[in-house]
Image (spheres, rainbow, N blue to C red):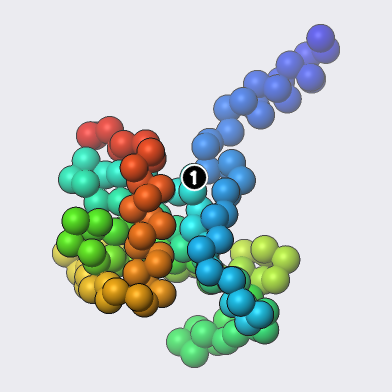
């Protein structure tokens, strides 16, 4: 094997896990909006909270009023407390229709500033949390640092 090929394979193998493609699981779909979760972004923290990434894919372009960013896809990073039936969003990213990154929050919201959202039976959040908690049953556990 030529040196260049070996070097390329070495570099490819050393890419971080983040470079993996997402595995979107659709939990609600309509003409204007599709909601999904990235199965690969679900893991259980040492304190039992479940990390997840939720995606909203809009048919029509949307505009974020705070940043004036126009987007078709919004991804929110969050945590779920499956026992207490609540969740919190801690980070945000916007993408174009073609999945081009447009904007993301610089840092996630720190834990002391989290504002937990209750989940009401039959709501969209209820469906999201049900799916997050189901995926979490077989998700990897984060090792203590």
Task: Point out residue 28 in the picture as x, y percentages from the top left corner.
Answer: 53, 69
Query: As displayed, is residue 49 above or below residue 86?
Result: above
Q: Tell me the residue at 40%/67% (across/down).
A: 127
Picture quarter with the N terminus:
top right
Where, by quadrant of the figure, is residue 7 drawn?
Answer: top right
Task: Point out residue 46 in the picture as x, y percentages from the top left corner.
Answer: 21, 41
Picture quarter with the C terminus:
top left
Q: Tell me the residue at 29%/67% (across/down).
A: 88
Side of 27 relative to 11 (left or right): left
Q: Which residue is mark 1?
A: 40
Examine the rendering and report whether any part of residue 51 can be seen. no
View extreme (bottom): residue: 65
Secondary element at tag 1: helix
Nearer to the camera, 38 or 10: 38
Where, by quadrant of the figure, is residue 120 drawn?
Answer: bottom left
Q: Tell me the residue at 66%/29% (across/down).
A: 12
């Amino acid at each position: 094997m030529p040196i260049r090929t070996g070097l390329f394979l070495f570099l490819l193998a050393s890419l971080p896990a983040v470079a993996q493609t997402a595995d979107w699981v659709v939990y609600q779909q309509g003409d204007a909006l599709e909601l999904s979760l990235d199965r690969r972004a679900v893991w259980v923290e040492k304190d039992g909270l479940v990390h997840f990434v939720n995606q909203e894919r809009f048919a029509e372009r949307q505009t974020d009023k705070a940043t004036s960013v126009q987007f078709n896809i919004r991804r929110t990073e969050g945590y779920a407390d499956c026992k207490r039936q609540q969740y919190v969003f801690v980070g945000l990213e916007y993408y174009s229709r073609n999945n081009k990154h447009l904007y993301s929050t610089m840092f996630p919201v720190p834990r002391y500033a989290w504002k937990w959202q209750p989940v009401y039976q039959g709501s969209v959040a209820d469906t999201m949390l049900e799916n997050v908690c189901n995926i979490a049953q077989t998700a990897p556990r984060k090792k203590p640092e």
